Amino acid sequence: MARIVQKFGGTSVADMARIKAVAETVKRELDLGSEVAVVLSAMAGVTDQLASYASAAGGAHYSPEYDTVLSTGEQVTAGLLALSLQEMGIPARSWLGWQIPIRTDGVHGKARIEAIETQALEQALANGEVPVIPGFQGISPEGRITTLGRGGSDTSAVALAAALGAERCDIYTDVEGVYTTDPRIVSNAKKLEKITYEEMLEMASLGAKVLQTRAVELAMKTGQRLHVRSSYSDVPGTLVVGEEEIVEKELVSGIAYSRDEAKITLVQVADKPGVAAAIFGPLADASINVDMIVQNVSADGKATDLTFTVTKNDLERAVKTIEEKKDELEYSDLVSDLNVAKISVIGVGMRSHAGIAQRMFTALAEKGINIKVISTSEIKVSVLIAEEYTELALRALHTAYGLDDG
Ligand code: ADP
Ligand code: ASP
Ligand code: MG
């Protein structure tokens, strides 16, 4: 008997009609003779609403009470789906994170799953019952409810699929699969039949929110096949698989964007050993992730400019952290810029082909888009541009790499 984990995102459970449709999808899989466990998100928009309540009450982003509030959206949908299934005569029950339990570390707001005890779920499945599990939540070593970071229900689903030894993990969402770029921005984006874990990992971490980065990381580590598909239709979606399963490797498989970027430039920093460590050490200590970094060659051997990016949320803390070190760093000015976006071109084919970056720079130049920072890795090229050009850049690059559909 095939064992399947089905995950439904926020739009797919947005109201009672959608939840009834989810129950029908679960039934179709059961009718094929599969064992099914279901993971759900909160109704679309609910987690944002809960976050604004928690903030208004004074809750710090990364605190136990904040997670107590944020995790409730999924409890509602899990209960409602279990009820809907029961109503159809299908044995089902909800299992909250702590009841399973799904054990995480104690980092509230972005906890990592450490272990899932499967005995109770195995028993439920053996009894012919559908376990309905709220995504996004777990329990800390201190016994408090934790959440896994925004979009974390994807990670719950992949972790459960791995723990239960599921044959497939189906991620049902509001688009038909993974596209060459966000189909809501580029209308002729193409749906990919397959994408490698590595490319999907880059796409997710560079901004494509169709899968949470940690979910892809975990799927790659455990070799869990993912099928990203639509909860509105039955057409095949996109399989996320190992590289060996893909015969024809595209040069560029996708383009991602992120508006969640902020740029900091330190003007005229002393050009001497230890300065970079003195800047980035304290940022790391403050758990601030630094992404792109460029340092100019100093003309006089004494001072140089240093530019780097952080997320918009972290900008204020990053500036404060650096300003506290001003005496030691001896820079003349600190300039920050929130009006930036990062555009990235991704493809495993880049490993063996030259000219990919050049095509990107030419396409952007032709549209008069200025590049502020560049960074590359083996399978991606990223550039930082002014935020207002995001959509123009995505469309121009999509065409330049021959990705347009039809
Ligand atoms: P869910 O609520 O189902 O988890 P999300 O909103 O988290 O759904 O993710 C789906 C959204 O991801 C889509 O509506 C789409 O706008 C966006 N997206 C961004 N990049 C891509 C891409 N390359 N392929 C598909 N969707 C993408
Ligand atoms: N409800 C959570 C969020 O909106 C988790 C998820 O949907 O994956 O981020
Ligand atoms: Mg999501």
Image: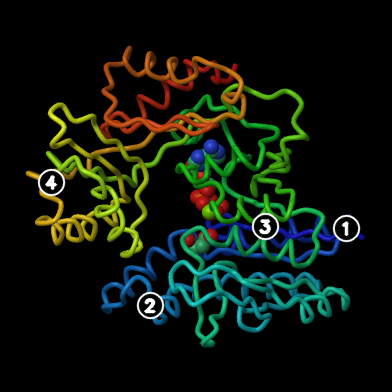
Of callouts 4 and 2, the N-terminal one: 2
Amino acid on which disc 2 is placed: Ser
Q: Is mark 1 within 8 Å of ligand 1?
A: no
Q: Distance between the Cα atoms at labels 4 and 1?
A: 58 Å
Of callouts 4 and 1, the N-terminal one: 1
Residue 21's disc is: 3
Amino acid on which disc 1 is placed: Ala
Residue 164 shown left or right of residue 140 in the figure: right
Amino acid on which disc 3 is placed: Ala
Position of residue 42 relative to residue 184, above or below, is below
Q: Tag 1's secondary structure? A: loop
Q: Where does residue 74 sit, x and y in percent of width and height?
A: 55, 70
Q: Tag 3's secondary structure? A: helix
Residue 12 shows in the view? yes
> Residue at label 1?
2
Q: How is the image coloured?
A: rainbow
Amino acid on which disc 4 is placed: Leu
